[in-house]
Amino acid sequence: MNSEILVKGIVLACVPQGEYGKRIVILSDTLGKITVFASGAAKQTSKIIGAVRPMTAAEFTLGEGRGAKSIHGISVMDAFDEISTDPETAFSGMYFLELADYFGAEGMAEEDAKQMLNLLFLALTALRKKELSPETIRRMFELRMLVHEGLYTEASGTDDASAEALWKYTLASPLSRLFDAETVRPVLSSAEFSDAVKHLMNREVPVKFRTASLLNLFAV
C-alpha cells in the first residue's frame, strides 16, 4: 500500500507529460526541489488543472509509485494572480522561479529548503505589494539567494554609502523583514546597488537565464 506525504511548496515549472499528464517541479519545504507527476491534469475536467501553474503556493499530498512521486491532492494557499497583470512583475516572478530552480536541489537539508522556499514566497509577495520596484526586489532576491548558497561578499565594492547600507541590510536582515519598504526606502540607491549585485551575479553564476533577458526590456 502506497504511503502519502504532505509537503508545502511553490510550483517552479509545469510541462506536458504524455497526452494528458503534467510533469511538475516544486520547491518544497522538506524535500527541496522535487519532480512530481499528475496524470490527467491537462484534461479540462481535471480538478487540479488550475492548481499546478507556476508560482502557485500550495500543500501537496504526494504518493510514491514506480519510483516516481505523483500528486494525489492539492490545497492552494496562494496563486499570486495579481503578479501576472503587469509584464514587469510577471517576468520578475518567472525569473525568481527560474533562479530557485537553478539553485534548488533534491535532498536539500530541511532548514535550507525552508529558507529558500520562504525567500521565494516573500519575494513574490513583495512583487504583489508593489511597495518596492521590481528591480530592487530582484537584486535583493538575487543577493540573498547568493547568501543562501555562500556565494557573496561582505561588502558591495562600491563607494556609495546607501548602496553599501542596502547591501549590508540584505545580508543580515531576518527574512521576514527583508522586503520591508519602510526600512529599505531610506537606504535605497537603486543604480549603484543594482550594479553591484549584477556584477556579483555575473561572476558567481555564469548562466544565461531565459527570463533575465526579458527583464532587460525594462532596464532604465
Image (cartoon, rainbow, N blue to C red):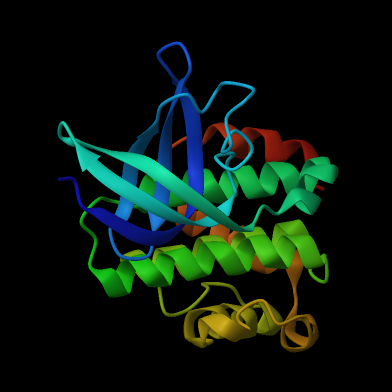
Q: Is residue 141 left or right of residue 106?
A: right
Residue in the foreground of this view, choosing between 126 and 206 = 126
What number of labels is visible? Answer: 0
Image coords of residue 203 (percent x, y): 41, 51
Where residue 42 sits, quadrant-wise, is top right
Q: Is residue 96 left or right of residue 190?
A: left
* Image point (41%, 26%), residue name: 39
Image coords of residue 209 (percent x, y): 51, 36
Residue in the foreground of this view, choosing between 78 and 147 = 78
* Image point (75%, 77%), residue name: 188
Which residue sits furthest top? 19
* Image point (52%, 60%), residue name: 142
Residue in the foreground of this view, choosing between 103 and 82 = 82
Image coords of residue 197 (percent x, y): 55, 62
Which residue sits furthest front? 1
Image coords of residue 170 (percent x, y): 55, 78
In this picture, is 192 found above or below 210? below
Residue in the foreground of this view, choosing between 43 and 151 = 43
Q: Is residue 122 left or right of residue 103?
A: right
Where residue 6 sits, quadrant-wise, is bottom left
* Image point (22%, 68%), residue name: 109
Q: Is residue 118 left or right of residue 32?
A: right
Where residue 32 sits, quadrant-wise, is bottom left
In this picture, is 29 found above or below 184? above
Q: Is residue 113 visible?
A: yes
Q: Is residue 202 visible?
A: no
Query: What is the quadrant of the N terminus in the image?
Result: top left
In this picture, is 209 found above or below 32? above
